[in-house]
Image (cartoon, rainbow, N blue to C red):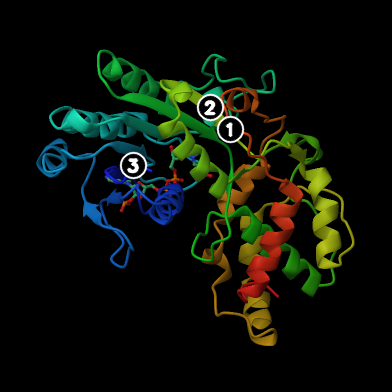
Amino acid sequence: MDSSRLTLIAGATGQIGSSVGMHLFEQQGWNPLGLARTPQKDAPYPMLALDLTDAQDCLNKIAALSNVTHVLYAARYDHFGGELESRETNVRMLENLLNALDSVSGNLQHIHLVHGTKYYGHTVKERRTPYQEDDACGNFNSFYYEQQCLLEQRQRGKRWSWSISRPHAFCNYRVDEARNMILLVGLYASILRELGLPLVYPGTMRSYRAKTQFSWLPTLARAATWMMTDERCANQAYNIVNGDPMSWSELWPHFADYFGMELGTPEDATFVDFARQHAQTWTGMVSKYGLRRTDLTTLAQWPYGDYVMSLQWDVVSSMDKAARDGFHERVNTTNMWLEGFDFFRSQKIIP
Ligand SMILES: NC(=O)c1ccc[n+]([C@@H]2O[C@H](COP(=O)([O-])OP(=O)(O)OC[C@H]3O[C@@H](n4cnc5c(N)ncnc54)[C@H](OP(=O)(O)O)[C@@H]3O)[C@@H](O)[C@H]2O)c1
């Protein structure tokens, strides 16, 4: 392992940046250096306070980093769930960083961007599945396409290479991450069970039956290190998902079994309303079961749950290209969910 690497993690406090940063920290030789506007004070590795929207701040602070060898870019401008994110701001953030790196890029080997299935326009319209990496972009309003074009253009004639991962809904076992479907469904199911109700799917029959997919975050972290080091990945994008697309109608019976509940039929309802209506019930459950003291409305990001369940068609990415080029990791999605419920129980977050 090359101990002279220095890996700049842009967006090091975010859902993805923090997990990938920890993964790199635990591997020998990656030497992560985090970057965010408000860095984590107790981070186990160094962090830099930098505002990527501020071109001068980038030039000033990146100037001292001539030994950066790798960049993992997982920054994403402020977003609140479900809304269209600013393409212009996100592209400018990457551009400011690339401009600043230009003057110190003598040691730069690779820049990896974490993107996602929005590239294919999975929220915009139904299209042929599985999505392949060279399918045409299906959502020019997302910032992915322009960031990728910018990166391709800036790489020409340079010694460094780039790669991009396209994961889907992330899953991880963390108690401090509200954008977490396993936690959200675990809370939802345990409240319904407490009320003696069946496990109803909150959404349309179509979304219940459509195939969907997830990305296990530790797998994405390993895939990112593969892309940053394997020559076959130079200047390529890869889908990174668990690899066993499933419908909610296939998962829901496993969840009902796990919680010892009757399986309900889909109903037109939202997680947001559910959390609002059952905050009191939750407070009672926290005392009754000796759980960690939490506020139901903020413990999980309920609008994110509604967004995930809102898709009315199959969303499936092909893992063939990753396998062809050497990444073979697959995750059993059902086990990932059930072991996740075990985790949140062991942490006294759900009963
Ligand atoms: N989360 C998912 O399920 C998911 C799924 C598929 C794809 N993706 C993609 O993965 C990438 C990362 O997303 P994420 O969900 O991990 O993001 P996130 O949790 O919202 O984190 C964003 C990160 O960017 C930093 N940041 C924001 N504005 C900044 C600025 N002006 N200057 C410097 N740093 C800034 C934030 O820290 P500060 O606020 O302290 O600056 C934070 O560390 C995005 O491209 C996203 O679309 C995410």
Disc 3 and disc 2: Cα gap in Å? 24 Å
Residue 48 percent location from the top left of the image: 22, 53
Query: Which residue is identified by label 2?
Result: 238
Identify the element where label 2 is drawn.
strand
Q: Taking 136 as reference, is 18 left or right?
A: left
Disc 2 and disc 1: Cα gap in Å? 10 Å
Mark 2 CB near ligand 1 (8 Å cut): no
Query: Which residue is identified by label 3?
Result: 2
Give the residue at x 25% y 13%: 157
Q: Which mark is residue 219?
A: none
Query: Which residue is identified by label 1?
Result: 327
From the image, which quarter does the C terminus lie in? Answer: bottom right
Identify the element where label 1 is drawn.
loop
Residue 126 percent location from the top left of the image: 67, 22
Q: Taking 235 as reference, is 288 left or right?
A: right
| Other residues around mark 2 within 10 Å, as few (<14) / some (14–19) / many (≥20) | many
Question: Which callout, 2 or 1, points at the residue further toward the start of the chain?
Answer: 2
Give the residue at x 40% y 48%: 17
Give the residue at x 27% y 35%: 93
Q: Taking 154 as reference, is 124 left or right?
A: right
Q: How many marks?
A: 3
Residue 169 percent location from the top left of the image: 59, 43
Quarter of image, ligand 1: top left
Q: Taking 23 as reference, is 271 left or right?
A: right
Q: Are marks 2 and 1 in contact (CB under 8 Å)?
A: yes
From the image, which quarter does the N terminus lie in? Answer: top left
| Residue 295 in view in this figure | yes
